[in-house]
């Protein structure tokens, strides 16, 4: 079982530090970092491998990739990148990790997709469905029966009231509030602190209280 607690993280910046902290709390360890840029390691003593070539060389050197769990440390509106990298992990035989901070609350009836991250003090309530490669960030709240697509990021302190639907690759900004039964279309961005009182179309950026269209 010890082998199942080895993690590899794509991304070597602040979010990698956050995920490494959760890994440590779960009695795991990070053995490798990957990044598309020449950057310093976010974690002392953990090497950074650059780009897909670096990842492939590292993977070739590992005898038991099925016992390594992959995490993606790309936040913001980077849902498509998280999904792509998770696919890359699977192609090489890594497991895609779903990770939940010990201080988060996930109801037993909730469903979390592969690679989803639920961070400290976040809540995922009864019968909520969260897709793959999502981030439910610190103190974010996903209330009962919400339906969240793939690659969604709910930023720190944001609140989704009950029965909210978020389609793929939506970004909900910090401390934003989405009122009950609202639907937000694919690739939409809700600005920090916005209060969403009506449905948001795909590819829209909305801001303010009440939220209004800024641009598409």
Image: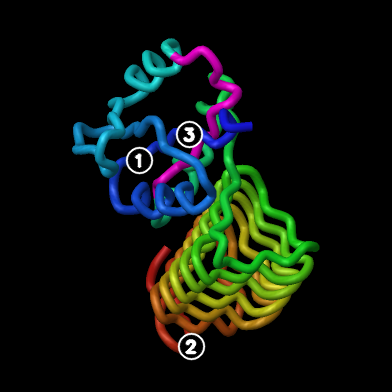
Which element carries disc 2, helix, strand or loop?
loop
Would you call the spot at circle 1 few (<14 residues within 10 Å), some (14-19), or many (20 or more)? many
Which element carries disc 1, helix, strand or loop?
loop
Residue range (magenta): 62-74
Is 63 drawn above or below residue 18 in the view shown? above
Residue placed at 67% from the left, 66% from the top? Answer: 165
Alpha carbons under labels 2 and 3: distance apart: 35 Å
Q: Earlier in the sequence, mark 2 or mark 1?
A: 1
> CB atoms at circles 2 and 3 under 8 Å apart?
no
Q: Nearer the viewer, mark 2 or mark 1?
A: 1
Residue 93: x %, y % from top left: 58, 21
User: Which residue is more in the foreground, 36 or 10?
Assistant: 10
**Looking at the image, what colour scheme do you see?**
rainbow
Q: Which residue is mark 2?
A: 210
Disc assigned to residue 11: 1
Which element carries disc 3, helix, strand or loop?
helix
Res 142 → quadrant: bottom right
Q: Which residue is mark 3?
A: 85
Res 4 → quadrant: top right
């Amino acid at each position: 079982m010890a082998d199942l607690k080895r993690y590899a993280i794509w991304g070597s910046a602040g979010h990698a530090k956050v995920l490494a902290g959760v890994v440590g709390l779960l009695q795991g360890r990070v053995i490798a970092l990957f990044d598309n840029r020449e950057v310093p390691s976010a974690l002392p003593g953990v090497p950074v491998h650059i780009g897909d070539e670096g990842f492939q060389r590292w993977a070739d050197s590992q005898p038991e990739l099925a016992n390594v769990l992959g995490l993606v440390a790309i936040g913001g509106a980077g849902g498509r990148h998280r999904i792509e990298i998770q696919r890359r992990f699977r192609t090489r035989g890594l497991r895609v990790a779903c990770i939940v901070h010990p201080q988060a609350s996930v109801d037993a009836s909730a469903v979390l997709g592969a690679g989803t991250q639920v961070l400290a003090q976040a809540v995922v309530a009864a019968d909520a469905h969260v897709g793959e490669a999502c981030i439910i960030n610190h103190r974010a709240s996903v209330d009962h029966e919400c339906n969240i697509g793939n690659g969604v990021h709910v930023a720190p302190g944001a609140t989704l009231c009950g029965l909210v639907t978020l389609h793929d690759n939506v970004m909900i900004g910090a401390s934003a509030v989405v009122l009950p039964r609202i639907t937000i279309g694919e690739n939409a961005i809700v600005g920090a602190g916005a209060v969403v009182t009506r449905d948001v179309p795909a590819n829209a950026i909305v801001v303010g209280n009440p939220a209004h269209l800024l641009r598409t």
